[in-house]
Amino acid sequence: AQSVTQLDSQVPVFEEAPVELRCNYSSSVSVYLFWYVQYPNQGLQLLLKYLSGSTLVKGINGFEAEFNKSQTSFHLRKPSVHISDTAEYFCAVSDRGGADGLTFGKGTHLIIQP
Amino acid sequence: DAGVIQSPRHEVTEMGQEVTLRCKPISGHNSLFWYRQTMMRGLELLIYFNNNVPIDDSGMPEDRFSAKMPNASFSTLKIQPSEPRDSAVYFCASNPRVAGTNEQFFGPGTRLTVL
């Protein structure tokens, strides 16, 4: 069984400051890792994904994430946030073996303060 | 491409009524997923289909829930009878099943309120 832990339910950050959203996962097999963003009253949009290869993954809107196998982590970072980054961010894991469903973390609400 | 289409976007019904949620996946995608989002439980996978065949429905909470995919371009999630605890946002997602990835594309969701 897989699980995803997002320790921070809410992260307040000042505009133009850096941010890191934490994600840890557990799985008995190799996995694919994803970060999705959800703006208010909208569906989920893929920010970035790790499938294989380089452990540093770059996504849309200036976000990046680093896969750390030894620490089973996939933290999301952005060097300078904008007010428009205010949203809910979800980390998700999928079994590498097949196109099955995603297991999501509980989400982190990123609040950008002016 | 229009993306994943869900209807209705909002549904308000009374306890005991039948509710049907609809989803049209992205053309050419042959995997389809139904998720439910609530404050208490977050995002949960309910059921998914590959090539119109249900593969895993272990996330379906009760027998009151059923899902069908009669063809590659349409799926329904039905709740009969509905209960207030079914109130949630229901998302449909599709996946092209390209080898080596599991990227899913989400619809805008259906917000269900059961009074």
Image (spheres, coloured by chain):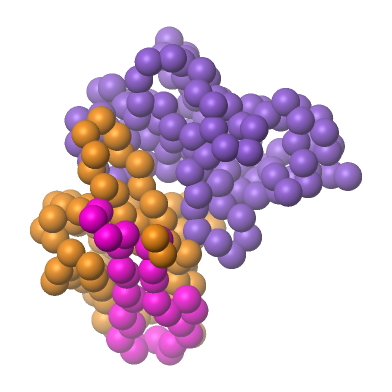
x then y, percent, for residue A21 = 62, 31
- Along the line of sight, the residue nearer the viewer: B18 or A53: A53
- Along the line of sight, the residue nearer the viewer: B109 or B63: B109
Instruction: State whether residue B28 appears in this view.
Output: yes
- Residue sitting at the far top: A70
Which region shows up in magenta? Answer: B3-29
Instruction: State whether residue A21 appears in this view.
Output: no
- Residue sitting at the far front: B1
Q: Residue at x 45, y 66 (%)?
A: B109
The chain coloured purple carries which letter? A
Indicate whether B84 appears above or below B98: below
The chain coloured orange carries which letter? B
- Residue sitting at the far right: A114
Residue A21 located left or right of residue A104: right
Residue A44 located left or right of residue A17: left
Snapshot quadrant of residue A29: top left
Snapshot quadrant of residue B65: bottom left
Q: Residue at x 70, y 45 (%)?
A: A85
